[in-house]
Image: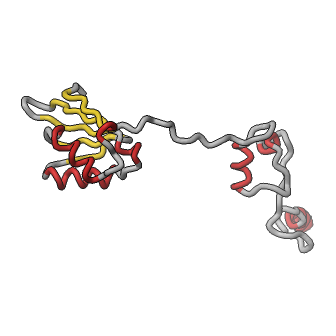
């Protein structure tokens, strides 16, 4: 009798559709969830859809027509500003802002300034280069020589400013 129960229990487990692969089913199986458990149903994704790229595009597009329009870069006036910032006692650093509006590579400009003035220079912000030392007088001429698209009218010297 105990043998009959164990065999019967074993058959139930073997008869479980999750345990045995069906010979007439196509694998991998696509599972369609009901609307209660799946947030994807609310977005309107059905069984035939579902690649990752399509899902991202659908999330971006809103109801009623056009999808989100990519924002263009803000039209900032093309102006290079140069400022002398006091550091300690009689030491200064020179801040150059606005070179990126002329599509100048800041890393390349930083290397050029460091080599030209034999000092340390670093890119600190989105559009800011800090040069160690007071080079406000020389840097205007150097910028115009190196990058001719930056004219004299678009360079502004702010003088000495606080950080």
Horizontally, is 75 left or right of 19 in the view?
left
Question: Which residue is rendered at x = 84% and y = 68% of the image?
Answer: 20
Q: Looking at the picture, how far across and down is residue 161, in whole percent? A: 22, 26
Q: Looking at the figure, which quarter contains the N terminus?
A: bottom right
Q: Looking at the picture, how far across and down is residue 75, in whole percent? A: 49, 37
Indicate whether 53 appears above or below 99.
Answer: below
Question: Which colour assignment does the render follow?
Answer: secondary structure
Of residues 62 and 9, the one nearer the viewer is 62
Residue 5's image quarter? bottom right
Question: Which residue is rendered at x = 38% and y = 45% of the image?
Answer: 100
In the image as oriented, which residue stretches furthest toward the left?
90
Q: Looking at the picture, how far across and down is residue 81, in whole percent? A: 30, 35
Horizontally, is 146 left or right of 14 in the view?
left
In the image as oriented, which residue stretches furthest toward the top?
162
Residue 140's image quarter? top left
Of residues 35 and 22, the one nearer the viewer is 35
Indicate whether 80 appears above or below 30.
Answer: above
Q: Looking at the picture, how far across and down is residue 73, in whole percent? A: 52, 41
Question: Which residue is rendered at x = 45% and y = 35% of the image?
Answer: 76
Indicate whether 136 appears above or below 15.
Answer: above
Q: Looking at the figure, which quarter contains the C terminus?
A: top left
Of residues 96 and 21, the one nearer the viewer is 96
């Amino acid at each position: 009798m105990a043998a009959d129960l164990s065999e019967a229990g074993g058959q139930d487990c073997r008869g479980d559709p999750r345990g045995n692969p069906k010979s007439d089913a196509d694998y991998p199986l696509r599972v369609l969830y009901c609307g209660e458990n799946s947030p994807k149903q609310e977005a309107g994704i059905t069984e035939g859809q579902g690649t990752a790229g399509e899902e991202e595009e659908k999330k971006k597009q809103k109801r009623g027509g056009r999808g989100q329009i990519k924002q263009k870069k803000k039209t900032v006036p093309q102006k290079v500003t140069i400022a002398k910032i006091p550091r300690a006692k009689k030491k200064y650093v020179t801040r150059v802002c606005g070179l990126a509006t002329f599509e100048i590579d800041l890393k390349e400009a930083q290397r050029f300034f460091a080599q030209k003035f034999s000092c340390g220079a670093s890119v600190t912000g989105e559009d800011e280069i800090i040069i160690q030392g007071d080079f406000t007088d020389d840097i205007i001429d150097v910028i115009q020589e190196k990058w001719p698209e930056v004219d004299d009218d678009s360079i502004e010297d702010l003088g000495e400013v606080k950080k």
